[in-house]
Image: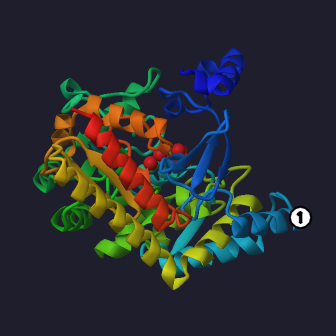
Amino acid sequence: MSDTHIKSQQIYERAKKVIPGGVSSANRLTDPNLVFTRAQGAYIYDADGKQYIDYHAAFGPPILGHSHPEVNQRVVEAINRSDLVGIGANELEIQLAEKIVQHVPSAEKVMFCNSGSEATFAALRLARAATGRSKIIKFQGCYHGGHDAVLMNVISPPEKVGHKDLLSAGMTPEVVDNTIVLPFNDTEAVAQTMREQGDQIAAIILEPIPHNIGCVMPTQEFLQGLRDLTQKHGTVLIFDEVITGFRHGLGGYQKISGVTPDLTAMGKAIANGFPMAALAGREDLMHHTRPGGDVFFAGTFNGHPVGVAAALATIEILERPESYQCLFGMGERMRRGLQQITGRLEVESTVAGFGSVFLIYFMVGPINTYSDLLRNDVSKFITYRKRLIERGIYELPVNLKRNHISLSHTAADIDRTLETAEEVLKTLS
Ligand SMILES: Cc1ncc(COP(=O)(O)O)c(C=O)c1O
């Protein structure tokens, strides 16, 4: 760490004494390991007072921008009225469930929880209970949280592609064995697996756009193929819209693609950075989770007024007609600008993204599946981002990570980013 990060360094050293590795979540330790002490709108500020335009966005939640005054105000009003009581229903959570049912095509009923991992865990258990089957299919490159059934094969090294690539020690072998990992966008691989084992497969789970490896767009044929195959074999189709939900539209990517899953996991941008997640889906499936039903679903903090109030405020702002127009417009401005610059400088690259998400891969396309991304120049990818950070633009310096634009980013922020990107790209040989 350089001389300009003295306070970050001091705080981090103190953190390491009481927190393993000094951070509370695996992906928060990066080089340079900065500590941020303020976040406002499109900007974050490190402990030494330096401002950065933030595109990391805490892995995606603050879609309106950090510390949004309207959201914060609604949270304060809610907790001044009542904090968590933990019995019966609460008016605000009903309103939020109504909003989700109104907007998300697959949502006939909704259950609230606190993290994306809880939502995908509940979705898979529910699928297993409803089908009486044990196996599931996930795709190489998709991340669905930290539980045993899915914590594998995300950003895998080449030698692990096509094999189980477990991301933690201590995972239960029986659970791991029941997960089949297939290549994304490969309808035939799924069709063959379903022909051979369809009667044992409880669920297919996917990020409709695998944003945990940047932005790999699904083909319409693939999404529709999954819908058709799951219907044919009585398998539950789960869209993990923890990133795509609310970031790309109030109805998630399912609304955009016109392919409606049976269950949907949501989180991240739903509450602009406050803890909130949800599982929604078909009424007959969701019915299993009612009190007294055969699928256990509970949590002390489920439907906490803080997250619920934040989500309601966030959704109401996103419902304004200009919101997604603005987010998508800024995304377009960024991607178009980066394409022009990389073209002009003849950088071997692909500018990818959708809506408010963007990134540069240092490789030429086509990019249809994870294996294609093994051609990405990792060293360039990370060096580029570290040099942006030195110049006050924060893109997470970790391979394949996506960037997010919020409603607080202005055209001037995008243009400054583009100027800086050009300056940095010229330094990369
Ligand atoms: C697509 C997807 N699903 C699930 C999760 C897990 O969510 P959480 O970290 O809130 O448990 C994540 C987190 O990054 C995610 O990107």
Identified by mark 1, the residue type is: Asn
Kindly indicate the quadrant of the structure image that contains residue 110: bottom right
Relative horizontal placement of residue 411, taking residue 63 as reference (left or right) = left
Count the numbered circles shown. 1
| Residue at image location 16% in from the left, 36% down from the top | 375
Image coordinates for residue 135, horizontal then vertical, percent: 32, 44
Q: Position of residue 183 (x, y in %)?
A: 19, 45
Residue 229, above or below 260: above
Q: Which residue bears the numbered disc 1? A: 80
**Which of the pair 145/231 is nearer the observer?**
145
Front one among 168 and 271? 271
Q: Nearer the viewer, residue 409 or 305?
A: 409
Q: Is residue 261 visible?
A: no
Image x and y of residue 39, in percent: 65, 49
Residue 313 in sight in this render: yes
Label 1 Cα neighbours within 10 Å, binned few <14 / some 14-19 / many ≥20? few
